[in-house]
Image: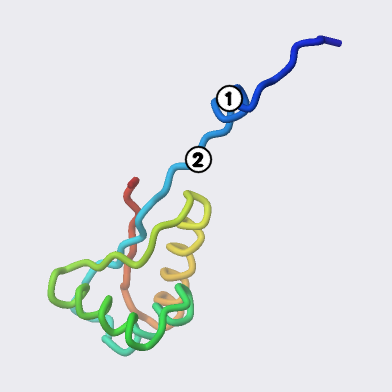
Amino acid sequence: MSDKVISKEDIKNLIKKPNMYRVILLNDDYTTMEFVINVLMVVFHKSITEATLIMLDVHKKGKGIVGLYTYDIALTKINQVESMAAESGYPLKSIMEKE
């Protein structure tokens, strides 16, 4: 066993913050605004006001930033969005971009 003492500075250098990813909803011509708001409230736990504002970004700008998450959580959210959309017959898509 080693007698080397690990300093707080050594620990800080070893511990890295995880990369963060933006989850973005993409506009399409078929998914209803109401459905997008519902997805934002159910999957991303947004209030009706927040969900409406994000939905309007998606509608007017072609995409809307939903949140910032670690890779695994972002991927899970994307899968939830696309599962909900497929079950309801909508082509709603979401992507992630590294921060």
Q: Nearer the viewer, residue 85 or 63?
A: 63
Residue at 25 percent of width and 68 percent of height = 64
- Left or right: 9 with respect to 23? right
Reply above or below: 56 against 1: below
For residue 77, above or below residue 47? above
Residue at screen point 32% across, 50% down: 97
Q: Earlier in the sequence, mark 1 or mark 2?
A: 1
Task: Decide: is 45 above or below 11.
Answer: below
Residue furthest to the right = 1
Q: Nearer the viewer, mark 1 or mark 2?
A: 1
Q: Residues within 10 Å of mark 1 (few under 14, many from 20)?
A: few
Disc 1 secondary structure class: helix
Q: Secondary structure at mark 2?
A: loop
Query: Depth check: 61 or 30 in front?
Result: 61
Amino acid type, label 1: Glu
Q: Which residue is mark 2?
A: 17
In the picture, the quarter occupied by the N terminus is top right
- The structure residue drawn at horizontal position 13% and vertical position 70%, both measured from the top left corner, is 61
Q: Position of residue 45 (x, y in %)?
A: 47, 77
Please give the residue where the numbered disc 1 appears in the rendered image: 9
The amino acid pointed to by label 2 is: Lys
- Total tally of numbered discs in the picture: 2
Q: Give how far across and how far down residue 31 sits, in percent.
A: 27, 81
Q: What is the quadrant of residue 25 in the picture?
A: bottom left
* In the image, farthest residue toward the left: 60
Spot occupied by residue 18 in the image (x, y as percentages of width and height): 49, 42
Question: What's the CA distance linking mark 1 and mark 2?
Answer: 15 Å
Q: Position of residue 98 (x, y in %)?
A: 34, 46
